[in-house]
Amino acid sequence: MVVYYQIAGKQIGSHVLAMGVLGALFGGVGLATSGGSQPKPAAPPIQAASKDEETFIQYVLTDVADPVQKYYYNGQGLGLELGLTSSYRDFLNQMNGGDKKKDH
């Protein structure tokens, strides 16, 4: 037995309303849980000749570029206060195995 409802001047059966409600419910849940699109990479991929070169580029992009941008965008210009020389020296020490003395 079907009950008809008068909506916008038309008679619509209860089974049609039920299918519409369920379709909207499951469609909304499906859209909400599908997730967003994949984020685009912020920079082009690194095409390094060796793994050490790629590691160095990643180090420069993450550890050195961020303080430079923060310092530069604060309107103070680029100065020696950043300690870029010591960061580079620390990176080279890390790549060479720390403070170990090597026999060359």
Image (tube, rainbow, N blue to C red):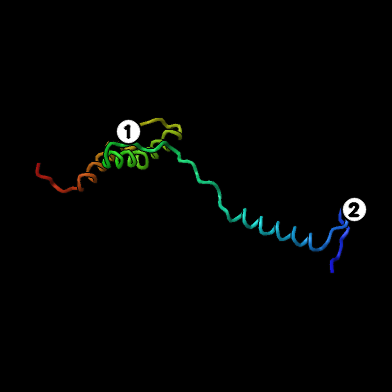
Residue 12: image x %, image y %?
84, 58
Q: 27 or 57: nearer the eye?
A: 27
Judging depth in this view, the residue of 25 and 12 nearest the camera is 12
Q: Position of residue 62 (x, y in %)?
A: 37, 42
Under mark 1, the amino acid is Leu
Check the picture and name the quadrant holding the C terminus.
top left
Q: Which residue is mark 2?
A: 9
- Residue wearing tag 1: 80
Residue 30 in the figure: left or right of residue 24: left
Residue 78 location in percent, x, y?
A: 38, 31
Numbered label attached to residue 7: none
**In the orientation shown, which residue stands out farthest toward the front?**
1
- Mark 1: which secondary structure? helix
Query: Which residue sits at x=86%, y=65%?
Result: 3
The residue type indicated by label 2 comes to Gly
Label 2 and label 1: CA atoms lie apart by 77 Å
Q: From the viewer's perspective, is the residue at label 2 or at label 1 nearer? A: 2
For mark 2, does the 10 Å Cα neighbourhood hold few (<14), some (14 to 19), or many (20 or more) residues? few
Image quadrant assignment for residue 53: top left
Indicate the position of residue 51 as horizontal and vertical percent values.
Answer: 27, 42
Q: How many marks?
A: 2
